[in-house]
Image (spheres, rainbow, N blue to C red):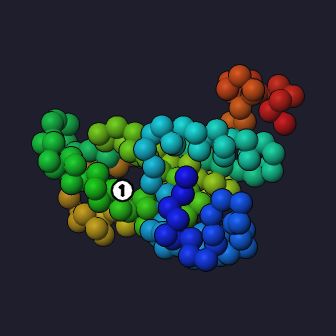
Amino acid sequence: YFYTDSVDGAACGRDVNLKKLIKVLAEQESPQGAMRVEYREFSRLFELVAGLVVRNRQPAQLLLISAGPAVQGEIEQAAQEELMYFMERAVRESLRKVDVCTRFSSTQFLIILVNAGPEHIEKISRRIFLRFYKLYGLKDIDIRYETAEMPPLLTDGAAPEPGDPAAT
């Protein structure tokens, strides 16, 4: 079921005016930047994007950002949460609405970058990091990233091996 009050004039049930519904959906306000979802939703969106990667032959990257104290040792939980709050803001504000992010652990964000090739990763990461330091300040924080091209998935959910015809 959907929230009927927001579908002013589109009616419900069999009398849905699809064109009005599309207009209402398109005009809904949504936060700027990357979509933030919980991990369970992220894994489903990963499957969707992986299917689009294969079908449309468009690139997508998986980006893992880790943040913690620059000096080895423990960081207080409140300080780590503050750091991750600003990291989430930096990620969301630096990316497009078609990109998706999730909090992966207490120190990491996992991001799907749609229609981005490996050649874009350094520029994208730099943009996120600069935004983070602008929001959080130049504190002693170590930020790292890892990236991988999103693999096409086989019907059983496994990624094909390099050279496998299913990979093309």
Viewer-closest of 29 and 3: 3
Q: Which residue lies most toward the right here?
A: 165
Q: Going 45% across and 49% down the picture, which residue do you hit?
A: 37
Q: Does residue 121 appear in the picture of this structure?
A: no
| Left/right of residue 92 with respect to residue 81 in the rendered view | right
Q: Going 74% across and 47% down the picture, which residue do you hit?
A: 52
Q: Secondary structure at mark 1?
A: helix
Quadrant for the C terminus, please: top right
Viewer-closest of 80 and 46: 46
Q: Is residue 83 above or below residue 130?
A: above
Q: Quadrant of residue 19?
A: bottom right
Q: Is residue 131 above or below residue 144?
A: below
Q: Quadrant of residue 157?
A: top right
Residue 54, horizontal then vertical, whole percent: 78, 42
Give the number of callouts: 1
The residue that label 1 is drawn on is 88
| Left/right of residue 114 with respect to residue 90 in the rendered view | right
Q: Does residue 25 appear in the picture of this structure?
A: yes
Q: Which residue lies most toward the front here?
A: 14
Q: Going 68% across and 36% down the picture, which residue do you hit?
A: 151
Q: Amino acid at mark 1?
A: Glu
Viewer-closest of 119 and 56: 56
Residue 25, horizontal then vertical, whole percent: 60, 69
